[in-house]
Image (cartoon, coloured by chain):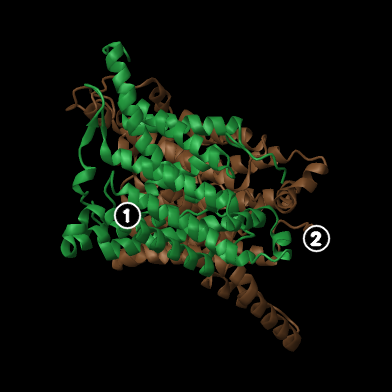
Amino acid sequence: MFGDYSIGDLGSIFVMQGFAGLILFSVYVLMALGLAIIFGQMGVINMAHGEFMILGAYVTWMTSNLFQSYLPGLFSGYFFLAMMLAFLASGALGMLVEWVLIRHLYKRPLDTLLATWGLSLILQQAYRSVFGAREVGVELPQWMLGSLKVTDSIEVPINGIFVMGLTVSITCAVAYVIYKSRWGRQVRAVVQNRIMAGAVGINTEKVDRYTYGLGCGIAGIAGSAFTMIGSTGPTSGQLYIVDTFLVVVFGGAASLLGTIASAFSISQTQSTLEFFMSGSMAKVLTLLAVVGILMLRPQGLFSLKVRK
Amino acid sequence: MIINSRFFNRSELIGFVALGLILFVILPLSLDVFRLNLVAKYLTYAFVAIGLVLCWGYGGILSLGQGVFFGLGGYCMAMFLKLEASSVENTKIQSTPGIPDFMDWNQITALPLFWQPFHSLTFTVLAIILVPGLFALIIGTAMFKRRVGGTYFAIITQAVAAILTILIVGQQGYTGGINGMTDLRTLKGWDIRPDHAKVVLYFFEVFLLFGCILIAQFIRLTKLGRILVAMREQEDRVRFSGYSVANFKIFAFCMAAIFAAIGGAMFALNVGFMSPSFVGIVPSIEMVIYTAVGGRTSIFGAVWGALLVNFAKTGLSESFPQLWLFGLGALFIAVVLAFPNGLSGIWADHVQSRIDRLVSSIKKKSGDWTSNSVADGAPAE
């Protein structure tokens, strides 16, 4: 397996594959963050999470088209507006879904799984009807193209660095909102004891709706970031949903730190293995390892010391 | 609930007879062979759905990986049929005669070791039951002994379905890849493709299905079935009463896996091919919806659910391909939000009560009572 490469080459391979893994890591983290909020905090299994992400990707695509045709001068900055729009669109749809569907099902977590799966089928077909079955790709502004040459054999793409920067800032923002802000305290209070939270005057229904909206909104941002590294089709979201759930479960459902750690280890394992074997076998081995570890340690990497 | 000494109560007996009449008499008489073969294909999912009634409806364990067991059963059967179809005479033009065509296309020159035993039909039949059963035993033991259940179990079984699909697609040379195993021809020299063979296979399948229904009904009525229900409702109390909750869960999960595998094997026989598109996440969730539509605690409901959802799917996707996904999605949501007990719930709440009222009024009037009026109405759902 390593025979044909020199030590220096191997080093470069690990760095480059490691970087490719970091981009995958960023998408996983952004998707898993939203899911960790919805699944970890609320206990709702949101199978439509991938579709919320794809909504963000389509919003980004539409914004870039708009800028191209009407505001070509500002094209280099379209992405920031697109990201906000993606957050708002996915978040708004999420709140609507919570109001129509999810709020009736809080006592039946397994049923949320079936209902949101139905929702994801409807959304997929809606995307197919509206945007067509073909995958679409956005045009990146000039400054995001190209790559940085670190050494002779190591190059890192700029859009990758941007996605990573984005991930770090979103993660910090989410951590701040959940752990430091007043609203985040209400969310955690509702999670820990819904009845008591209601008794001390927290509007638990409103908290639920906004929490679900926030999770979906972050999925929208993930979709926005996703457009920079891949093309978007109606079923792209479904490809990521199982991986993302594994990331969240592997990390320990209620722990943001665990989510990040597990996203990191899964993405790094997968992209490093990908260099030495076919992509499908790399994925099989990674998923098998995750399932195997989960069988030995069902509570995930990091778990809250709470008995339920 | 009072323990019923009889195997079927009255309405169950009517359901059983009605289903038997429809599957054994009415459908074979009224449908042409092509449609009958479609029914046979749909009924293979009914096996899975009955398994899910035991495991999900009674045991409360939602498995999103039934496609795995359906696929394992189907692939075991398909491997046997494929080997028989790839005799040396049939595959003369290949660079290595005597091995399946897809192996030849993938530059494999000898039959892999794990394919060898599938020359024997006895081994194949055993493998159809044992391979998925053992696999379910391993997964079930690993998860339930550590008290993993509910949503976590669902997600992990789903991951297993994803892994198996990627593996089958990726290992093209050994499994036939994304196309699966096609061109299956004979079973011990008996051609499975002509019309009369399809009819024979249909009846064989319905016999097996009724066997599975009876087994499921037996499990439901014994103490075992009652412990499953108790476990679903109050797991801790059952545990404190001294029962090993994990073992009962493992049993239910293994039974569901074996039923699914029988369905998969019948699928390979009836449809004549097996591919990874019946293994993965999407088909596994669709199998859950058959059970949910039929009513998750109703064995007959599961059969009806599998039949009706698939008829709707074929009908809608033939004429309005766009609408099918909307319809299926709406069905998921409607079943969860509005009809948690599915068709059997609607039947029990709206139809059965009216029939009962009708029957009692007739009884009052004439003093004698026949079950004809009930039997006529039964299949109309």
Tell me where residue A41 appears, x and y as whole percent: 59, 51
Number of residues whose C-alpha sits closer than 10 Å to that of mark 1, classed few (under 14), some (14–19) or many (20 or more): few
Q: Please say if B334 is above or below B250.
A: below
Is disc 1 on the same chain as disc 2? no
Instruction: Spot the residue most to the bottom.
Output: B365
The chain painted green is: A
Question: Circle 2 sits on which residue?
Answer: B2
Q: Please say if B251 is above or below B12.
A: above
Instruction: Write down the chain letter for disc 1.
Output: A
CB of mark 2 within 8 Å of CB of mark 1? no
The nearer-to-camera label among 2 and 1 is: 1
Is B147 on the left or on the right of B276, as rendered?
right
**Residue B176 visible in the current orientation:** yes
Is B318 on the left or on the right of B364, as rendered?
left
Is A281 on the left or on the right of B376, as rendered?
left
| Amino acid on which disc 2 is placed | Ile
- Residue at the spot 66% in from the left edge and 64% down from the top edge: A202
- Residue at the spot 28% in from the left edge and 65% down from the top edge: A130
Number of residues whose C-alpha sits closer than 10 Å to that of mark 2, classed few (under 14), some (14–19) or many (20 or more): few
Image quadrant assignment for residue A296: top right
Instruction: Write down the chain letter for disc 2.
Output: B
Q: Please say if B206 is above or below A252.
A: below
| Amino acid on which disc 1 is placed | Phe
The chain painted brown is: B
Tell me where residue A1 appears, x and y as whole percent: 33, 15
Mark 2 secondary-structure assignment: loop
**Residue B175 visible in the current orientation:** no
Question: Circle 1 sits on which residue?
Answer: A80
Instruction: Spot the residue most to the right.
Output: B241
Tell me where residue A118 appears, x and y as whole percent: 46, 60
